[in-house]
């Protein structure tokens, strides 16, 4: 048996000298071992080679079993070591289940989001005012992105005329409250987020709800709500992503006067007279336009919450879909702004 051991050791050393991969060295040694077993099995007892190999097939078989056990143990250990980084990856993200890690894998892969960013999204609470054209894609993408708590506020019910662009709602949902219809779609898309429906108009009473959220998205379709949302978000010190669309054009910005940016009223101090700016119902709107701008609202929200890139803080993006043109203009604070100015 000593001869076999010396042979195996020689093969190992030869493998190192030839810089053969460990797998090849082990294969050569296994072949030598099997050869010695075969020789023991076929050679008659007392044969010179058989004696040199130990002379007893049972010893060879016992050593084979021990070797197999050792190889199996080492392979199992290696597999555990390979698995260890995945198990460790759970630690920084804390409460993510394996299903959630799989669901958000493409986000976690992004250098700018990663595990910490995804954790920030899960910890975030975002309120979306309006479950209409802009709210539909914004709500769906916030849900898909894994924002932990999403509030949705809207007083309306789903109407057939909404379905041309309000893609969160279904034909079967006509007549249902929009917040209920939206909640069903969101839970169907991602059961790991919490949806809080508020079936009411955003007014001075419901403004207290803002306190519960980290970020407000305003996709409402009227000036009353837009100005009030700006005023209340500024008062509560909450950042506001506000967007508006009409016909072929949309605009969006992130207003955060508590942290130095202008507010909506800094930029649009003159409230249009009632009836001067036609609503979507009066003027029409291209179906995918709220999809484009509403998705941008969700994009800005994800960036704001994860700290990725450069958001639209202090900048207004204007998109003209009819001519496929987009402009971004820098905004400045008005000192005499009645909402956020130092000399209101
Ligand atoms: Zn202002």
Image (tube, grey):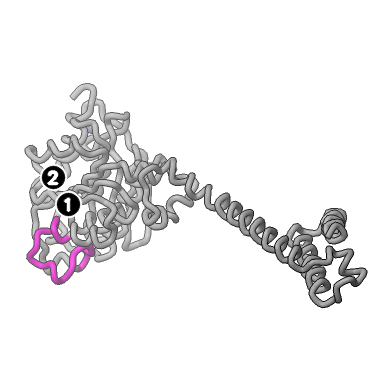
Ranked by sequence position, the earlier of labels 1 and 2 is 1
Classify 33 as above or below 105: below
Q: Nearer the viewer, residue 127 or 278?
A: 127
- Where disc 2 sits, the SS reads helix
| Residue at image mark 1 | 130
67 in magenta: no
- Tell me, yes or no, if residue 311 can be seen here: no
- The quadrant of the rendering that contains the C terminus is top left
Q: How far apart are marks 1 and 2 (CA)?
A: 10 Å
67 on left or right of 152: right
Do tag 1 and tag 2 residues touch (Cβ < 8 Å)?
Answer: yes
205 on left or right of 53: left
The crowd level at tag 2 (other Cα within 10 Å; few <14, some 14-19, many 20+) is: some
Q: Position of residue 181 (x, y in %)?
A: 15, 61
Instruction: State the predominant SS element of the stretch in magenta.
Output: loop
Q: Nearer the viewer, residue 249 or 74?
A: 74
| Residue at image mark 2 | 225
- Where disc 1 sits, the SS reads loop
Number of the front mark, 1 or 2: 1
Q: Residue furthest top?
A: 343
Q: Position of residue 331 (x, y in %)?
A: 33, 37
């Amino acid at each position: 048996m000593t001869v076999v051991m010396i042979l195996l050791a020689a093969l190992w050393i030869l493998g190192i000298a030839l810089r053969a991969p460990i797998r090849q060295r082990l294969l050569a040694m296994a072949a030598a071992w099997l050869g010695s077993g075969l020789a023991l099995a076929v050679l008659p007892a007392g044969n010179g080679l058989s004696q040199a190999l130990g002379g007893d097939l049972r010893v060879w078989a016992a050593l084979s079993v021990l070797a197999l056990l050792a190889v199996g143990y080492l392979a199992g250990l290696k597999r555990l070591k390979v698995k260890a980084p995945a198990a460790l990856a759970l630690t920084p993200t804390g409460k993510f289940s394996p299903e959630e890690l799989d669901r958000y894998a493409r986000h976690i892969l992004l250098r700018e989001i990663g595990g910490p960013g995804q954790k920030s999204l899960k910890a975030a609470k975002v309120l979306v005012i309006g479950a209409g054209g802009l709210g539909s894609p914004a709500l769906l993408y916030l849900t898909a992105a894994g924002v932990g708590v999403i509030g949705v506020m809207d007083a309306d019910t789903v109407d057939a005329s909404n379905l041309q662009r309000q893609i969160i709602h279904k034909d079967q949902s006509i007549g249902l409250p929009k917040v209920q219809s939206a909640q069903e779609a969101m839970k169907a898309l991602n059961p790991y987020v919490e949806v809080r429906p508020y079936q009411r108009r955003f007014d001075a009473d419901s403004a207290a709800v803002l306190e519960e959220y980290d970020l407000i998205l305003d996709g409402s379709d009227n000036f009353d709500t837009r100005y009030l949302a700006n005023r209340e978000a500024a008062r509560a010190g909450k950042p506001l992503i506000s967007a508006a669309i009409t016909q072929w054009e949309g605009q969006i910005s992130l207003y955060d006067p508590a942290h130095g940016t202008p507010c909506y009223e800094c930029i649009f101090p003159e409230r249009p007279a009632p009836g001067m700016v036609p609503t979507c119902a009066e003027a029409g709107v291209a179906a995918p336009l709220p999809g484009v701008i509403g998705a941008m609202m969700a994009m800005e929200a994800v960036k704001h919450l994860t700290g990725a890139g450069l958001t639209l803080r202090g900048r207004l993006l204007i998109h003209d879909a009819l001519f496929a043109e987009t402009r971004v203009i820098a905004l400045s604070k008005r000192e005499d702004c009645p909402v956020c100015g130092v000399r209101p």
